[in-house]
Amino acid sequence: ESFKSKISLDATDTVDSLLQNISNAYGNDQVNVSLNAHGQIEIVDKKAGSSKLDFHLVGATDFSGSALADITNIDDLQVGTTDFKDATDAVPNLYVKEFTKSGFDPSDPLAPIEGINYDRTNFAKDGANLSSNISQIVKSDNSFATPSTKLFDVGAFSASTVLNLKGIQTDGVTPYDLTIDFTGGSVTAGGATIEDGYGNPTSPENMTYRQLMDIINVAVTGQSDIATANQLGETSLSSDGKIVFEDLTNPATEASLSIYDTTSNTYPPSGTTITGSALTFNANSALTIRDPKTDFFAQIDTIIKSVEEGKTRADGSDSTDPRNIGIQNSIQMLDDLSDHISRLQTQSGSYSQVLQASSDRSDLLIVSTKMLQSDVIDTDVAEATLRMQQLSLNYQAMLSSISKVSQLSLVKYL
């Protein structure tokens, strides 16, 4: 499930109170929440094999004693400061504490405090590609989404779900800003009804990732039809379920892309929990260190990068690479990879033993079958030899009798 919660703390509360509140927000005994030796919050999913855990936290304190920190629109915190010693802001008594920093560009350039933007961030730009960092995972079986996967099988949709799609087109100049509305009987994008391959309106529960990616392709390339848009850009799902847009006309794209729930900035009253974003694509979220879905070579590359950059631990304050996991977590990741290899070796050894045992049983069955066949249809050589000798003697006796009879003549009796 996706959720958003507001936690109220005062000067008498401890860090343990914060950790307990985080655990409660996830639900009854769903996660383990702790503080590691480096002062970082760690959350572990208790559901074995799950890859859907996500986390983002931002804090606000109003030193004036009023209610400036207790807001329902998180964007209201933009008037604060991330440096409590700084008194030059419009509201110097409002201090914002960022727990996660990723270096992502916000979808709104007027939102400079990064911690306030959870999923309202632009996709990462790498050459001609724009890539998201959140995998789309099917809830029922924990598999990565494919183009034919329905959005409802992945997200936490409600009757009021609307997604914002905004950014700059591939020409580097023209902005686009449209809504994908799931609130009616059929899905609309920018006011136009989304149709399936047969020309029928698509209901919200039947909307697929292929249709969503077609909308993204049309919007980012600035075209009016899918066929033309596909000649200028290509939107796809990577092997680990992340959306990737490729600019087919520019080696270094000038486009930008963000897609998020329109209620992303809305938070409930203190002490209550509401449904969070229906879908999350690119988020300033906590780093994922351990995952049951092991991409061996990608994780090795991550570990090598941490060592090459000399990053001892994950530290979002490092502006050059804020999402680097650091050597501290790389060691844990390497241990997990080692365990993963050992499990695969054990599994392979088990399969090998099963195959060998099956082969031995097959050989035994072949021998047994041949013995049975021999007992049933093979000739008894001794018995056959004796029988042949008996028949030969009988034959010789018969020939002798015939010879004697043939020698008889009437002359002898005359």
Image (cartoon, rainbow, N blue to C red):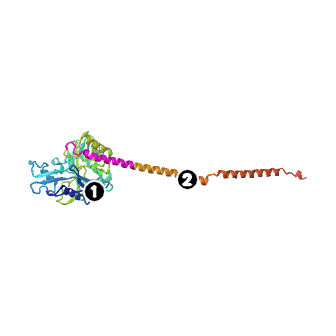
Q: Residue furthest top?
A: 251
Cα–Cα gap, marks 1 and 2:
62 Å
User: In the picture shown, does residue 306 fall above or below 369?
Assistant: above
Report the residue marked by disc 1.
Answer: 204
Q: Where's residue 25, x and y in %?
A: 22, 58
Indicate the amino acid at tag 2: Thr
Q: Amino acid at mark 1?
A: Pro
Q: Please name which of the two marks, 1 or 2, marks the residue nearer to the observer.
A: 2
Local crowd size for mark 2, using a 10 Å CA cut-off: few (<14), some (14–19), many (≥20): few
**Within-10-Å neighbours for mark 1: few <14, some 14–19, many 20+:** many
- Reply yes or no: does residue 340 show up in magenta: yes
In the rendered view, does 398 fall on the left or right side of 213? right
Q: Farthest residue in the right direction?
A: 414
Q: Quick one: 293 or 205, which is closer to the camera?
A: 293
Q: Is residue 377 visible?
A: yes
Dominant secondary-structure state across the stretch colored magenta: helix
Q: Residue at x 26, y 56 (%)?
A: 31
Q: Which residue is mark 2?
A: 369
Going from the N terminus, do you reach mark 1 or mark 2 first?
1
Question: Could you tell whether 92 is left or right of 352 in the image?
Answer: left
Please give the range of residues in magenta: 318-346
